[in-house]
Amino acid sequence: MSITNEHVINALRTVNDPDLHRDLVTLNMIEDVKVDGKKISFKVVLTTPACPLKDKIKQDCINAIQQLVDPWAEINIEMTSRVTTRRADKQPLLQGVKNIIAVASGKGGVGKSTVAANLAVALGRTGAKVGLIDADIYGPSVPLMFNEVNTKPHAIEKNGKTLVVPIEKHGIKILSVGFFVDPAKALVWRGPMASNALTQLFSEADWGELDYMVIDMPPGTGDIHLTIVQQLPVTGVCIVTTPQEVALADARKAIGMFTQDSINVPILGLIENMAWFTPAELPENKYFIFGKDGGKKLAETHNIPLLGQIPLVQGICESGDSGNPIALDFSSPVSAAFSELAEKTAQQVAIRNATLEATKIVEITK
């Protein structure tokens, strides 16, 4: 029997995306099918380069063709990606950004900025185009974490507008109010001033085309959070907590804020930071100094994904202070934890885009 393109496509109709539970052909994930005798080639277009299931999907395709078409076929599969988006808004802000991921916490001190910076870097390492906005107006830390404290972004003229060019470091485009103020002085701004400064980072910068924009939110639940969801179509929120009850109580408030009817922004999942302490000299040991699995249990209670458990190690602090996020250190087990976090976050973004309504700005009427 001569193998035809139709034989291959029909076989691939039996292969489901493990997350979306629909077959690859229906999802338009199969492209460029070519058959030459027993040689079969095609592309599988994933929903993100960070897909944690790419190896399983590839093997499932091979198995389907061997079982349903020809067990001796020579199969060449190119695994590529096209990041999905569900933006249906016509807002002028960040038009070239496919997905906006807010990283939030109910309180300070849980390592939210460290998580946001390393999540952005880890997403960038997969090949995605990534930006990072430091929206923590009163305590901007991204310039320090990327060793750009004294850097001043330059401006360009584009389409009759003056736009700031984000700093590019480690392949990530970054902007922070910290680039424009004296790092030694406190910002004494009322709410509207802070909100206006933040809006400028969105509206007066040349961000270009991005797959993911990570926003490092300020701690708590306040004006800045409302400004962001009312001006930007936020794809979803990642909530950062530590395992102890005082942090979990505030994480519950953050979850409650984003899920209340008047806001209703999807929660992509929960990140448990400082899940355990591991000393450098005893890398196999885990000491649960803040309690065990508090974040995991909270995620289960609210029926939201646990995106990752990040250990507390000295290297995280050192890498942040030196301006080289630990996600860049391939030899570190913490880098592996952030890589897994990036994969799971991208996975939840793809699921969100495939199963929920289009993203749009929040219109709060009361």
Image (tube, rainbow, N blue to C red):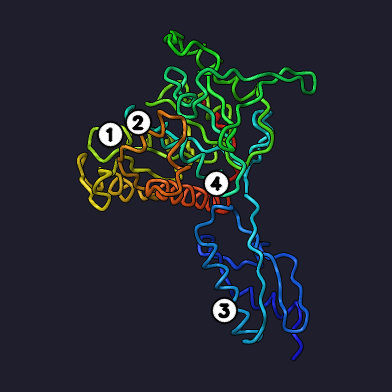
Which is nearer the eye, 180 or 145?
A: 145
Q: Position of residue 5 (x, y in %)?
A: 75, 77
Identified at 51% across, 62% down, the residue is 53
- Specify which label sits upstream in the sequence, 2 or 3: 3
Query: Label 4 vs label 3: CA separation?
Result: 30 Å
Q: Return the mark for residue 247.
A: 1
- The structure residue drawn at horizontal position 64% and vertical position 37%, both measured from the top left corner, is 97
Instruction: Quote the CA–CA distance across marks 2 and 3.
Output: 46 Å
Residue 95 in the image: state x and y as whole percent: 68, 34
Quick one: label 4 or label 2, which is nearer the N terminus? 2
Label 1 vs 3, first from the N-terminus = 3
Mark whose residue sits in front, 4 or 2: 4
Q: Amino acid at mark 1?
A: Ala
Say what amino acid the circle numbered 4 marks.
Answer: Arg
C-alpha separation, residue under disc 1 versus residue under disc 3: 47 Å
Binning the other alpha carbons within 10 Å of mark 1 as few (below 14), some (14 to 19) or many (20 upward) gives many
Question: Cα distance, mark 4 to mark 2?
Answer: 28 Å
Q: Name the front one of labels 4 and 3.
A: 4
Residue at the (71%, 76%) spot, across then down:
40
Q: Are marks 2 and 1 in contact (CB under 8 Å)?
A: yes
Mark 2 lies on residue: 106
Disc 4 secondary structure class: helix
**Which of the two labelled residues, at mark 2 and mark 1, occupies the earlier sequence position?**
2
Using the rendered view, name the quadrant where residue 71 is placed: bottom right
Q: Secondary structure at mark 3?
A: helix
Q: Give the numbered dot on residue 63.
A: 3
Residue where numbered disc 4 is placed:
125
